[in-house]
Amino acid sequence: MKIAVGAETDPSEPRVAATPETVKKMIGLGAEVAVEPGAGVKSGILDADYTAAGATVGKGAASGADIVLTVRRPSPAELNGVKPGALVIAIMDPYGNEAALKALADARVTAFAMELMPRITRAQSMDVLSSQANLAGYRAVIDASAEYGRAFPMMMTAAGTVPAARVFIMGVGVAGLQAIATARRLGAVVTATDVRPATKEQVESLGAKFLAVEDEEFKNAQTAGGYAKEMSKEYQAKQAALVAEHIKKQDVVITTALIPGRPAPRLVSAEMVKSMRPGSVLVDLAVERGGNVEGVQAGKVTEVGGVKIVGYTNVPGRLAASASGLYAKNLLTFLEILIDKKEKKLTVNWDDEIVRATALTRDGLVVHPNFMPKSA
C-alpha cells in the first residue's frame, strides 16, 4: 500500500497534507509513503524531515500510489499521474465546479471531499472545516489588530487611559467563536450575532454580549446538521436595522457567515461601512464566496472613507504550519477508517456513513447525490 503526499501547485496554497508526525503513523498502518520534493517547505517542513520520518522524497510521488493526499483538489494535469482506482483525498471545493468533478470521474479515481465530513461525534477528529475555521477565526483578529491603529485592551497609564477596542463578530460558528475568544484575550469589549439561537449561550460563556432580533423565526433558525438556515426577507430587514445601529459604534467588525453551497450572505452594506468611524476595520472571512461585506475585494485590504476592509483569501494558510498540522491529523484519522490495521491493507467500507458522505467519484462516475449530473 503506497500513500503519496502531493506538492500544491497553486502558488497561494502554502499548506501541505502530511507532517513528519503523520508520515510515521501512516507507515505504522503498513504504508509506504512518498512525498513530492518541496511539498512542505512553505509550512516549515524540509524534505529531510520527511526522509527522517521514513518517507521517500522524489518526483512523481503519486505514480502507482493507492492513496493520494493533497490540500486542494488536484488539477486534471496532476490526475494524469494517478492510477485509476486510486483514492484521492483533499478539500475538493465541489460546489459549482461540475467540470472539475467530471475530470475526477474521467480519471477514474475515487475522490473524497474532506469538507463534506458529516457533523457526527465519530467524525469530529476528521472535520477539516472546523480545524481550519478555528485558525481562521484566530487569524482574523490578529489581522484586524494589525490594521487597527490603536491598542485592543484598555490601558491606564500616567499619560491617560486608552479605551478598549469594541469588536463585533458576525456569525458564531467555529471561526466566530475562536474570534470571540481571541479578541477577549486581547482585552477587547466583544459583541457577537448569529441567526442560530443555540449560539447565544456559547457567546455569553466566552464573556461576550449577544445581539439579535429574538423572535419566533430566530428560535427555529438552525438545521438538523447545525448549520444556519437562510432567513426570511422580513427577518433580515429587522436584523439589519439592529446591526446597522450597532456597527456605527464598533472599532472592528469580523464577518464569518457562510452557508454551504451558496454565495455568502451580505451582512454589511456600503451604508454601514460609511457609518463607521475612520480608522475602523472590517475583516471578511467569507470573501472567497463573494463576501459578507459590500465592497470587499479578494486578496486585498481596501479603504473606504478611512475604514479598512480586509479581504484576505485562504486565511488558514496564513498560519500554514499550524493549519498543515491540524489538516494532516484530520486526514490521518480519516485514513484509519479506510485501512485494516491487522491486515495492513486498504479496506474501504462503502456502508460507513462517513465514507458515503464524503465520496465524490467512483468507477468513472460522480456518486455523491448532491453533485450527480442532472438528467436531461
Image (cartoon, rainbow, N blue to C red):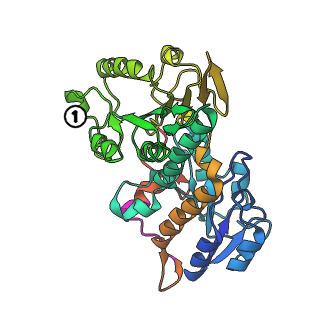
Residue 284: x %, y % from top left: 54, 33
The residue type indicated by label 1 comes to Lys
Residue reaching furthest bottom?
Answer: 342
Side (left or right) of 319 relative to 169: right
Side (left or right) of 19 relative to 332: right
Side (left or right) of 138 relative to 36: left
Residue 202: x %, y % from top left: 32, 46
Residue 46: x %, y % from top left: 75, 67
Corner quadrant of residue 351: bottom left
Q: Which residue is drawn at 44% across and 63% down?
A: 125
Q: Is residue 175 visible?
A: yes
Side (left or right) of 306 relative to 125: right
The tally of labels here is 1
Corner quadrant of residue 231: top left
Residue reaching furthest left?
Answer: 216
Of 279 and 158, nearer the camera is 158
Q: Is residue 30 visible?
A: no
Q: Residue at x 72, y 79 (%)?
A: 52
- Magenta residues: mostly which secondary structure? loop
Residue 39: x %, y % from top left: 73, 61
354 inside magenta stretch: yes
> Mark 1 Cα within 10 Å, few/some/many (few <14, many 20+)?
few
Of 323 and 121, nearer the camera is 323
252 shown above or below 44: above
Q: Give the range drawn in magenta.
A: 346-355
Of 310 and 299, nearer the camera is 310
Q: Residue at x 45, y 71 (%)?
A: 337
In the rendered image, the quadrant that contains the N terminus is bottom right
Name the residue tied to disc 1.
219
306 inside magenta stretch: no
